[in-house]
Image (cartoon, rainbow, N blue to C red):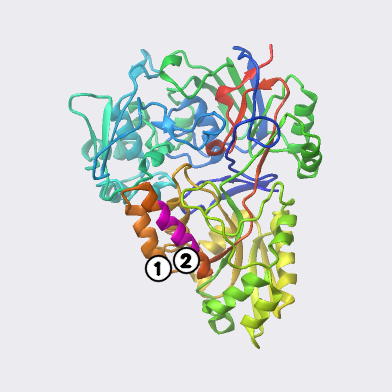
Amino acid sequence: MEINVVNRTSRAFAVAAVVAVGLAACSSSGGGTTTGTSASGTAVRGGTLTMLGVGDVDYMDPNVSYNTVGNDALRLWSRNLYTYPAIPGKTTDAMPDLATAPPAVSANGLTYTVTIRKGAMWDTNPPRQVTAADAVRGLERTCNPAEPSGALGDYLNLVKGLASFCAGFEKTAPTVSAIASYLKNNSISGVSVSPSDPLTITYTLNQPATYFTDLLAMTNFAPAPAEYLSYLPASAALAQHTIADGPYKIQSYVPGRSIVFVRNPAWNASTDPIRKAYVNQIDVNETGNESSIQQQLEAGTAAADMEWGAISPPPSQIPSLIASKDSRLVVGPTYALNPYMLFNFKSPNNGGALQDLAVRQAISYAINRSELVQDAGGPTISPAQTHVLPTGVEGSQNFDLYPYSTAKAKALLGSRKLTLTMLYQSDSPIQSEMFQSIQANLQAVGIKLTGIGTPAADIYTKYLEVPAVAARGVWDLALTSWYPDWYGNNAVNYLLPMFDGASFPPESGNLGFFSNATVNNLIQQGQTAVSQSAADQDWAAADKAILQNVAMYPITSPEFVGFHSALVHNVVYVPYLAQFDPANVWLSK
């Protein structure tokens, strides 16, 4: 299988690395190799947790970081208003972190009021209370002109006044002084601090959004201390001068090599319901490789406790580890689409044949999904996906409109003979094998398929994000992947950026340039629905309409597979981290 160190953008373009195993799993209760958790016994405090892996954080900046490895690090030293707990069965439920309780929501669904816990402190000298003004500053920093957050599109037009605030900020010089000046003299009209309580903040929305509480679990809404105005956002200088409000602080950070987290003396466990912080120190080594790391973890060496970042057991070892029911192995379901197949609606090739619904339906019938699942490691770790919304996402319903049938494919194609080009990641063994399988499937119904294999680093920036490339017909079909920016109530994060016809690359993740009035209307209705049940109906209807119009061909939603030393306990996989949660494990004495 493969894993992507993902910049979880609403466009979901950036894929930083390709190694083994799928990303983003949902934990369920229990233990062993089927649940996303490996925990038992009485908690032990103390010791140093050693994590080995590959892949560095993108930025040591909570409001700008947009990398799953960045989330791993932030979990330890930076707190969100809401976040996902390391509790089996609840790892995708946004729960209060810095917030005292769920938001107070107005009857019309337009205002959300959040109060920050008293006693949550910054590691300053002397320690200082985290305030609502810090939360305002954090959100404002996400659209800074030096390095804006990739997740900005998730909420830019939702929070009242944010779009105009960011439009002005974008025109500001990307310097420390200019940024500080803009923040001092401008504000977001829809975000305010209570005049009677400096710990209470209110967000006003342009429209109801049943998913806004889940959005508040993103690091983009995390508070930022005033001291950050002395550094450029996401800069190397800021990375060496972070201020913690979590249980750990960064003692040392050597980019691409190592991170050392030690206890934060300003942190009070009574103010943090998410992190138990059993271990005294966490040492991260980012210079390993999957084979040597797996050997060390299995051997239980003193310098190998848990995986870090984009690392997992070697693919060749996963079947035997699963078969042996090794208690150190954790497998859990994901909410990812990885990969799925795009149709290029702008392609002029074959007389614009891909704009013909019957042609897209024929291609869908012609593909044997079970063969592609085998290419990805088999159904145990790569179960088939036949619709957009993965199981467990709000509005998801199970259906398959295009079961494998060469007879139906040939009937729909008639006498047409097509020549198509598929774009895929050449450095992904899975996508390379899938291309060959699809090529053979289409040949069986009279379609000639050629391929453009390109490295993961180029597939978006040189192809999928460039409208002119699609318009020239450089590619007709493409294999790509999608991971959500947040979890829980997040159906909109699949449907809106991927299929809404109001926006196309590079501004959105609608990489196939699909537009359909029915789908657009259903997405809009789901966004503005006041009740969750009404939104779920719209999401389900949109999902089916997308497949009826064959905007894409879903293939698999891969499993997460991870491994840890027998010396580590309370190991729980949290999808948002795309790894085990280091803030809640303990070590054998």
Q: CA distance from mark 2 to mark 1?
A: 7 Å
Residue 190 visible in this rendered orientation of the protein: yes
Q: Position of residue 411 (x, y in %)?
A: 65, 82
Q: Earlier in the sequence, mark 2 or mark 1?
A: 1
Kind of residue indicated by mark 2? Ala
Quarter occupied by residue 285: top right
Numbered circle sitting on residue 518: 1
Kind of residue indicated by mark 1? Thr
Residue located at (39% from left, 59% from top): 523
Residue located at (22% from left, 24% from top): 197
Which residue is at the front of the view, 17 or 68? 68
The magenta segment is 536-544
Magenta-drawn stretch contains 480: no
Farthest-out residue, bottom: 415
Q: Position of residue 539 (x, y in %)?
A: 43, 56
Which residue is at the front of the view, 325 or 117? 325
Kind of element beneath mark 1: helix
Mark 2 Cα shell of 10 Å, populated few (<14), some (14-19), many (≥20): some
Q: Marks 2 and 1: CB-CB under 8 Å?
A: yes
Q: Position of residue 250 (x, y in %)?
A: 52, 23
Residue 497 visible in this rendered orientation of the protein: no
Residue designated by label 2: 545
Quarter occupied by residue 495: bottom left
